[in-house]
Image (cartoon, grey):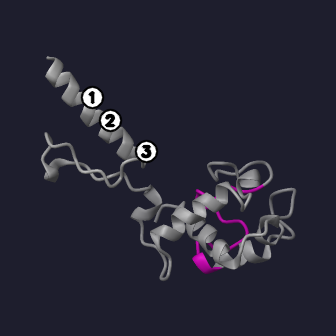
Amino acid sequence: MQRFLTRSAGALSVALLAACGGASDAAPPATQPAETAAPAAAPAQTMMQLPDGVTPEMVAEGKTIFEGPGTCLACHGPDAKGTTLAPNLTDEEWINTTGRVYDEIVNLIMTGVPQPKQHPSPMPPKGGSSITDEQVRAVAAYVFSLGSH
């Protein structure tokens, strides 16, 4: 019984680490055949078709910037589902663009939204942050990835 519990606890630890990204390159436990081992969970946003030139690495970097130096979460919320200050970026309703179009998202972040259609505060260019143009493209990749296609 103890051997079973030890093996189960080890498999659970590996699964939890993989789900949290902590052991994405770890081999599956020796007691589990490789063909039945689940790969590390990929973020949902990388499972869709990304625009030409956009990579899963850009999406991951964009998420980091969105939550950090880009200060996007201050208005759009930590889950990007919007607040009273800024719209939800995860749904299919696009207020200030024609839709979930990568180049339009890049342009919107670069130029800002001086006169929002539904929210009280304008968005300054780059959200008022000092992120680079390359970082803007990464944030746009992350925002693009938030929708279901």
User: Residue 102 lies in magenta, yes or no?
Assistant: yes
> Picture coordinates of residue 10 (x, y %)?
26, 33
Whether residue 118 is visible: yes
> Where 29 sits versus 95, above or below?
above
Residue type indicated by callout 2: Ser
Residue for point 24% across, 51% down: 27
Using residue 142 as the reference point, say whether residue 131 is left or right of it.
right
How many other residues sit within 10 Å of disc 1, few (<14), some (14-19) or many (≥20)? few
Say which residue label 3 marks.
20
> Picture coordinates of residue 4 (x, y %)?
15, 24
Say which residue label 2 marks.
13
Residue for point 74% across, 76% down: 110
> Where 12 sits versus 41, above or below?
above
> Mark 3 to mark 2: distance in Å?
11 Å
Residue type indicated by callout 3: Cys
> Mark 2 to mark 1: distance in Å?
6 Å
Q: How many marks?
A: 3
Q: Secondary structure at mark 3?
A: loop
